Image (cartoon, rainbow, N blue to C red):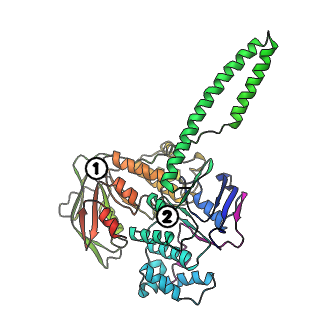
Amino acid sequence: MSPRQAVLGIEHGAFFHGARKVFSGVSFLLDGASTGLVGENGVGKSTLLKCLSGELELNAGKVIRSRGLRIGYLPQEVPERLDGLTVRAVLERSLARIGAGGEDWRIDVLLDEIGVSPTVAQEAFGALSGGWQRLILIAGEARLEAPDILILDEPTNHLDIGAINTLAAWLTGENRLPMLIVSHDRQFLDRVTERTLFLRGDGTHAFKTPFLAARQELLRRDAAAATRARLEDKEIKRLERVAARYKVWGVKNAKFDKRAKATRKRIARIEAARAAPWSASERRLELGEAGIEAKVALRVAGLPVKTPDGARMLFTIDRLAIAAGDKVALLGPNGAGKSSLLTALARAWADRALHYDGAAPVRFNPASRLAYFDQSLRDLPLETSPLDYLMQADGVSERDAIRALAQAGFAFARIRDPVGLSSHGERSRLIFLKMKLLRPNFYLLDEPTSHLDIEGQEDLETQLEETDVACLFVSHDRYFTRAAATRFVEIRKGRLVEVEDAEGFFDAQG
């Protein structure tokens, strides 16, 4: 099917989870272009993709699709049932789905293109990093199955810079497909998409431009609508005063009574035609902040960083000092040991410990209060409610927790529902909210923007800039790394070295 025939969309679509509205009034039509789907955490982007793919059914409206349309769909979460298969077996499944089971040479070509050796291809898929798993699944969907249209939900999550560049090259190459991509990676969206679709509580807004230009136009539309609403409010109040005067005068002269009725009809026409200007929910992401009196928040000297099983050395830190207010970006390709370092530092810190041992390789300031954001979100109890999760923090009452959730934009009707019903972005925001209540002054952040919407990323950038907390973070989001970091350290040839900026590292990744 040619790109011109690959048509997919929704007409007046709505979806409800029980009595709760996820989205409604959604209408759009995709074509041969690459389209980015953008929206706040929890607005229903992933649910919308599942409706398009056929995994879920709309409660109202209908899905529009070309006859015989073949959709390639990759959700956010990697299916656990693949863990026990080999890498090659996972790709063989893609060929089997299109009836090309005997064309194994296509797998060999793809593995060589990705840079996966024959030895790794025979290893268990579940033993690979999350980034490699996603890259292989996307390759299977896009390159082996060759669908008519490709739907990707957060395809860059857990990918390093090199893998993101490889993915972008695939998606924009000569064999490019019509696509719908949900992503919060601003630079990736601008590189691979031609159109942008914003999903909001007031419906969908489509633009024939990549994300950054589309967002500026949407902001201009919102500003114009707000201005128009203010003028309409002013005009309605003026007409109401006029109608009131006509009503009084109409007691003595019937012609004024007719004018009063005509004026009220004019008011009704204005009110019927007007649309309420968009007002985003107030849900600012904030970092808690406690002071550190001494300048240096952390000293590291002679620290060996090993694989999680301790079997292999990854790199060594000869010397590293992080001061209060430093925002340090940790650079390195997948597998270099970035997450292993953050885990090692988190283990070296213990609440209420004095951290005075001058001989220890990791020495935190005694006044340090550490918060650790783990990209896997594995410590978040999915069966617990957001309210109970926040109340686990020392000194946080139910009233405190309810107020904090309301200020962060969590709907009151949902704060007692299990966390597992929330989107990944909402789960990330919940972890940041609890960290704020703990009032840390040192943050270890492992891929903090993976699930945050773009507004959340910008809030986090602003908070890191405006607060005096110390922070060591890992991020494959180039836009965020450039905006948030004040220092850069890179894992290079078995050592941790300080570099002037991140551009050399980014360029080296392709």
Q: Which residue is drawn at 68% across and 55% down?
A: 14
Q: Which of marks 2 and 1 is nearer the N terminus?
A: 2
Q: Which residue is drawn at 48% across and 86% down?
A: 108
Tag 2 residue: 192
Q: Which part of the image, by quadrant, shows the N terminus?
A: bottom right
Would you place residue 282 above or below residue 340 in this image?
A: above
Give the image location of residue 237, x and y in percent.
Answer: 64, 24
The reply to whether the magenta stretch includes residue 321 is no
Residue type at mark 2: give it: Val
Q: Which residue is drawn at 68% across and 22% down?
A: 240
Viewer-closest of 321 and 226: 226
Tell whether label 1 touches label 2 (CB within 8 Å): no
The residue mark sitting in front, 2 or 1, is 2
Quadrant in the picture for residue 241: top right
- Residues shaded magenta: 60-86
Would you place residue 246 above or below residue 361 in this image?
A: above
Q: For the residue labelled by badge 1, is the local secondary structure a helix, a strand or a loop?
A: loop
Q: Which mark is residue 325?
A: 1
